[in-house]
Image: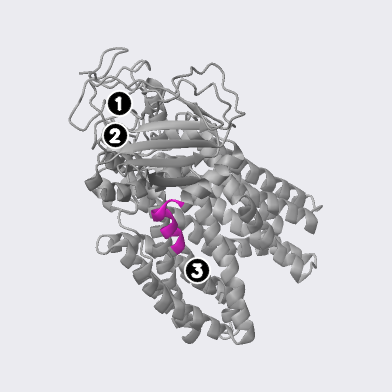
Amino acid sequence: MRTPYFHPDSIRAACDDDVSGAACRHGDGAGRRVGGRMGGPPQRTGPRQWGRIECWGRTTAPEHITAVPTSEQKAVSSGMAKSSPWAPFRIRAYLILWLAQLGANIGGWMQTVGAQWFLVEVGASAVFITLVQTATTAPSLLFGLPAGVMADSYDRRHVLLAANLIAAGASTVLAVVSFLHVLTPVGLLACTFLLGCGMALNAPTWQAVIPSLVPRKQIPAATALGSVTINAARALGPAFAGFLVALAGTSAVFAVNAAAYVLSVVAVLTWKRPAKRVGRREPFRSALFSGMRYTKAAPHVNRIMLRTALFIVPASAIWALLPVEAHGRLHMGSGGYGVLLACLGVGALSGVFVLPWLRRRISSNKIVVVASIAYGAGTVGAALLPSWGVGVSLVVAGIAWMCNFTTFNSLLQLTLAPWVRARGMAIYLLIVMAGQALGSPLWGTIATLWTAQISFLVAGGLLLVFVPISVRFWPIRPRTGELDRSHDLITHNLSMANSVDPRTGPIEIQVSYRVHPDKAPAFVTAMDAVRLSRMRTGANFWELTHRLEDPGLFFERYSVPSWGEYLLQETQRMTGHDRANLRAALRLTSDEPRVRRELPADAPIAGVPRMPDDEDHPMGDLRPRDPDMPPAENSGTQNSGRQNSERQEPGTQEPPAGDQTA
């Protein structure tokens, strides 16, 4: 029996994506594995182990890859670490980067307050002062999704470093110009916009980096702690800025912000990890649209985003109208408003302890219901209660805010495929910002027409009634966060792969399946999951038909925008869950499926052998098969003005049905 052999480059690529901290080693780098010969195939290490890789550093690889943990990783994988919301802090790289994010977020809020106060001092108009917030958030709306594309296309450590360098440079220039007393309002807005660009690039990258820093079971805790940096900064930053402005002026505030981003740059530089091998890099426009197609064709992902949108629109009322409520009905000054913000921050910090307790007792859908009701009660309380009651209500609202968004965020990170994780997180962050941008003027309009109290009551009513009821109709789907998102190590050796221009397209693929009539209904049902897999990984059109004269012969047809994207679909994008969907359909077939690939008639192909016109070629690399079975012969055709390309049996065998590949 032939033992499947993994190409060392494929194994190294898989490890580089999952191992943080120390370097990963694979013997001499020539494919040697524990239990295997130098340069030869590895030995089976168990019924569900497909070779063994020895790694020095944490790994989140699936069970067929065995990691040799360091003492630090053994500590964080203990039972106590799993149950503690602070367990991610035991990982040095996460702790350093978390502290850097906290400092940068506090500095960002301080910079916003300092910029607004500077414009007040120089006598700028109210409209000009409001542009500070616009200059800070506009880059995230404009460049958030492109930032996600960059984070998926390049080494995320380098993208994170570039983001912090941009922010550090802009904030340093702002501080120096301010100390020299040559800062103008226009110059302030320009530096603020550049600082916002760095923040826009940083946000999706940091979200996508978290799963590579901690074990999979600690991702919810790491996400909750990441939310703490935002909410703690929201509460502490304005207070620190107000104190520092009174003590040393706005220039000192700008200097502190610059120092925070410089320290962030140092923190990223201290993060030592193997350079990630980036495979075939897709063009920017193609990567942008593939991220959107993935989100659209991923039911678990778009359901999380729908739940986020349904919550954020009414929840934005507190953030939008709290200053109006504090100044109006509660008759508070700036100090009192700061105390109310601190109550929200205290609630968010408390949520770090409350959420693990809830997770042990109720499902994610019930957490969403409970948190929405709690946030709605806090919103109503802010409208009706006296000052002390408003403070208590805001603590409850802060806990609920943390529980809901940490649940959404962690489930999304666990559900997104690694190759599109940053783009998915960028779309998620855009939904959060768009929800706040749309919700804030809505609640402001209601407050203008009536009162802020009425606006709070309407928003609170939606959170108390509509949002919990909507969970019955649009719940978080079963198995969300539990799907196999491991990489596939199968190498597809298409002989014509380098003979076609990657930009050539569209590529049309037709796969024929022979199905027994009794199994046809089950096959059609199974192929619906295959449809979603094809659409997630690159297809922009898909259909399943069967021949009128021969009902047992089914044809799957789908189209991919370009040859380069087709190669990415076949070699880099298929996850264990996608392969499982395909295997489930193939088990219902009675013969070897056959595939044709067709190019546009004017697409040049160099050096591709022509085969008889009346043959298709088998799809042996997709169908589970006996390792001793020889690969089927390949053939190609040319028909209907399109060129048909061949498909070869890959050099590496696929694991038997039931195994999941990374």
Looking at the rendered structure, the secondary structure element under dot 2 is helix
Residue 506 to residue 351: above or below:
above
> Disc 2 to disc 3, how far (Cα)?
39 Å
- Residue 417 falls within the magenta-colored stretch: no
Q: Badge 3: how crowded within 10 Å, few (<14), some, or many (20+)?
A: many
The residue lying at 31 percent from left, 51 percent from top is: 525
- Which of the numbered marks, if any, corresponds to residue 53? 1
The residue lying at 30 percent from left, 57 percent from top is: 478
Nearer to us of marks 3 and 1 is 1
Nearer to us of marks 1 and 2 is 1
- Which of the numbered marks, if any, corresponds to residue 342? 3
- Residue 298 falls within the magenta-colored stretch: yes
Marks 2 and 3 in Cβ contact (< 8 Å)? no
Residue 2 to residue 102: above or below:
above
- Which of the numbered marks, if any, corresponds to residue 71? 2
Visible in this render: residue 240?
yes
* Region in magenta: 297-306
In x, y percent, where is residue 584? 27, 42
* Front position in the image: 463 or 561: 561
Looking at the rendered structure, the secondary structure element under dot 3 is helix
Furthest residue in direction front, as rendered: 549
Q: Badge 1: how crowded within 10 Å, few (<14), some, or many (20+)?
A: many
* Front position in the image: 124 or 457: 457
In x, y percent, where is residue 408? 41, 58
